[in-house]
Image (spheres, rainbow, N blue to C red):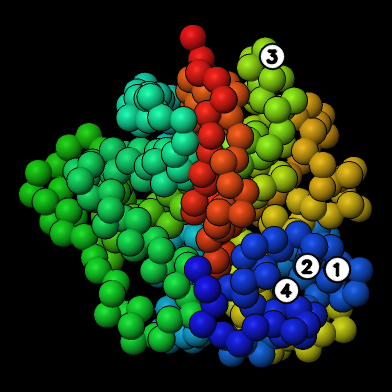
Amino acid sequence: MTSRHPPVEDFANDFDHTDPAWVADPYPIWDDLRQRCPVAHSDRYGGTWLPVTHDLVSEVAYDHEHFTSRSVVVSARRPGPDDLPAPIGLSPPITSDPPFHSIVRRMLLPAFTPTPTAALEPFTRELCRELLRATEGRTTFDAALEYAQHIPVRVIVRYLGFRQEDADMFRSIIRLVLEEVDLPVEEREERFTEDAQIEDHIAHPRDDLTSFLLEAEIDGHKLPVEQVRGTMVLLMIAGIDTTWSAIGASLWHLAQHPEDRRRLATEPGLMDTALEELLRAYAPVTMARLVATDFDFHGHPFKEGDWLLLPFPAANRDPAVFENPGQVRLDRARNRHAAFGLGRHRCLGSNLARMELRVALEEWLARYPDFELSDPNAVTWSAGQVRGPRTLPVAILRNGS
């Protein structure tokens, strides 16, 4: 995706997370900023800040006095308190502030424990095998378009109890919310549609996540339909594009590192540790906050309503915390990464994401243990706050038994 804004000349005072240089490779940008100015600023999007060290990212993530989660995606429209009133926000609990955040998160926890996640594993595994069977007999294909992108969207569709045919609609909503942030506000609002499946679930309850949300109660009261819809949008945003990106980035890495492919193929006990390292090195998610009140942040004059990008991927590449952070070590022992966020907003669906990533890699390596990029220059990456390969052409060198 090409940025609709002028190109950036100096990321320290004019950064843009949709700029082609950032989209192609943000890591050198963050390394440079970490040395020059660990808190960058831009006038774009109405004023945005960017801390790039682990300590500063962590400080913001745990500070609920000076920052609000009312909106977590930077765009041309900066919502004020009357647009998305705290503490609920548009997509609770990720857009909720204390104390409402803890109430909603506690209500949702039973749906994301290891038990319901494990129940989805057989479907996920068969889905991966189905997608891989569709590539049989071909020596080249796009691993992002034909494999990675389908797994999380169809798992979430299954979990919500929607039709599998709704997957394309889900993808279009996600692209609008996360990647097309530099579109005019009016165009974004016109293209955002809401799903009529809620009404169908009200009329015909069943055993799925949508019915769970419709039956859930807080203080003896069922959730308003608007809150149910907002939480479903959150699941689409937080559970689909992020995991698609993590799977794609992991395959991108393995396509270029035969020694890591061999280790995962011959050392199955390494998989869990390897997953955490791939998540650290290629963490897909950058969140956002709004400054809640004027205050001085390490010498920077933060103003109420300013955006702040919270780049967990940059925190994961901080050499002050991780030894040789630019190197992927599948057996890295000390690895308290921030791929799933930090603080009270840490990803509620981390169990589900880990399961999908593990199954996706296990099934891929079982069928295609030896592969490479067929055209490294043809790989493209998503713009915005979720980073992952959107085209990933691979060449199959050897099929599994």
Q: Secondary structure at mark 1?
A: helix
Displayed quadrant of residue 309: bottom right
Contact flag, marks 4 and 2 (Cβ < 8 Å): no
Q: How many residues crowd around disc 3 within 10 Å: few (fewer than 14), some, or many (20 or more)?
A: few
Contact flag, marks 1 and 4 (Cβ < 8 Å): no
* Circle on res. 59: none
Of the image marks 1 and 4, the number of the one nearer the N terminus:
1
Q: Is residue 78 above or below residue 162?
A: below
Contact flag, marks 3 and 2 (Cβ < 8 Å): no
Image x and y of residue 217, in percent: 31, 50
- Nearer-the-camera pick, 262 or 96: 262
The residues bearing labels 4 and 3 have C-alpha atoms spaced at a distance of 39 Å
* Circle on res. 29: 2
Q: Is residue 105 above or below residue 1?
A: above
Of the image marks 4 and 2, the number of the one nearer the N terminus:
2
The residues bearing labels 4 and 2 have C-alpha atoms spaced at a distance of 12 Å
Q: Identify the residue position indicated by label 1 in the image.
A: 32
Which residue is pictured at 89% across the width and 44% down the height? Answer: 324
Q: How many residues crowd around disc 1 within 10 Å: few (fewer than 14), some, or many (20 or more)?
A: some
* Circle on res. 50: 4
Q: Identify the residue position indicated by label 3 in the image.
A: 267
Which residue is pictured at 35% across the width and 56% down the height? Answer: 171
Amino acid carrying label 4: it is Leu
Displayed quadrant of residue 128: top left
Q: How many residues crowd around disc 2 within 10 Å: few (fewer than 14), some, or many (20 or more)?
A: some
Amino acid carrying label 2: it is Ile
Amino acid carrying label 1: it is Asp
